Image: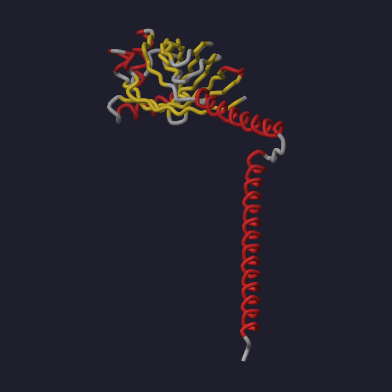
Amino acid sequence: MSSPRELQLQQQEEGAAGVQVEIASDSMAADSADDDGREQLGLQQGKQRKFCNCYPQSQRGRRLCAFGVACSTAVFITVVVATAFLWPRKPSWELKSLDVDKDALNGLIGVFLGHSPSNGSIPSVPFAAVVELYNPNFASALAEPGVFAIKFHGVKMGTGTSGTLHVPARSSIQIPVNVSVDLDDDVVKDLNKAISGNMFDLPFTTVGTTDVKVPFGIRVRCSVECAIEAAVLQLISDPAKVVKQKDCTYRYSLW
């Protein structure tokens, strides 16, 4: 049996051991907190390196990094705005007038109806047209002379030309167009069948190209193909209304 003195010494030793355990626990917790803080700081530094491609240690470095970010943002905004303003939008057009020599027109109508030409040959028929073109783009354009072909079932039956013209941005202009219709016997036979079986409506296509210069010295080649349905009898009563329907496809390429 232990004496009171021995019991007192034993209790003091146990208390000192408990204090040491608490101190060790606190030390380990502090070390763990330090490790967590260093890990979070490392992650933050890694993100900054990834964003700026550098981790600026000095005020000058931070300024350079901020300047690089600002430049990148400005370039991105410039590209977006330029694309919005310069990306080609589909124009629209409408036939405003169509003039043709009456004798030549009567001969052409007769051929469409199956009548043989008086002189045994099918004459070339010239048309003078005025087309109103609307440019929906935010940039103006300078169009060089354009050429297009008139085709029926893939066979050429005429040509058209337009001159050099300036097309203002988001505006309409009227364009003079010269058209010549040249028919051979084989095409006439197909035309007669198509017109008689379609209530005197004639489907045909126009295919053309023109080179266009837009701001900043950019040169664009514009190709257009239009599927048109013409009301042939309107050539007699009101030629400007000869175009009954139209559907155009536009393609652009840099050159």
Which of the pair 191/179 is nearer the observer?
179
Residue 112 lies, in percent from the top left, at 35, 21
Outermost residue, front side:
4
Q: Viewer-proximal residue, 118 or 16? A: 16
Quadrant of the image occupied by residue 202: top left
Judging depth in this view, the residue of 202 and 104 nearest the camera is: 202
> In screen coordinates, is 52 left or right of 207?
right
Please indicate, yes or no, whether residue 161 appears anywhere in the rendered image.
yes
Residue 62 appears in which quarter of the rendering?
top right
Q: Position of residue 51 (x, y in %)?
A: 63, 40
Q: Residue at x 65, y 73 (%)?
A: 17
The quarter of the image holding the N terminus is bottom right
* Horizontal relation, residue 16 to residue 188: left or right: right
Which quadrant of the rendered structure holds the C terminus?
A: top right
Number of labels in the image equals 0
Whether residue 121 is visible here, answered yes or no, is: no
Measuring 27% from the left and 27% from the top, which residue is drawn there?
199
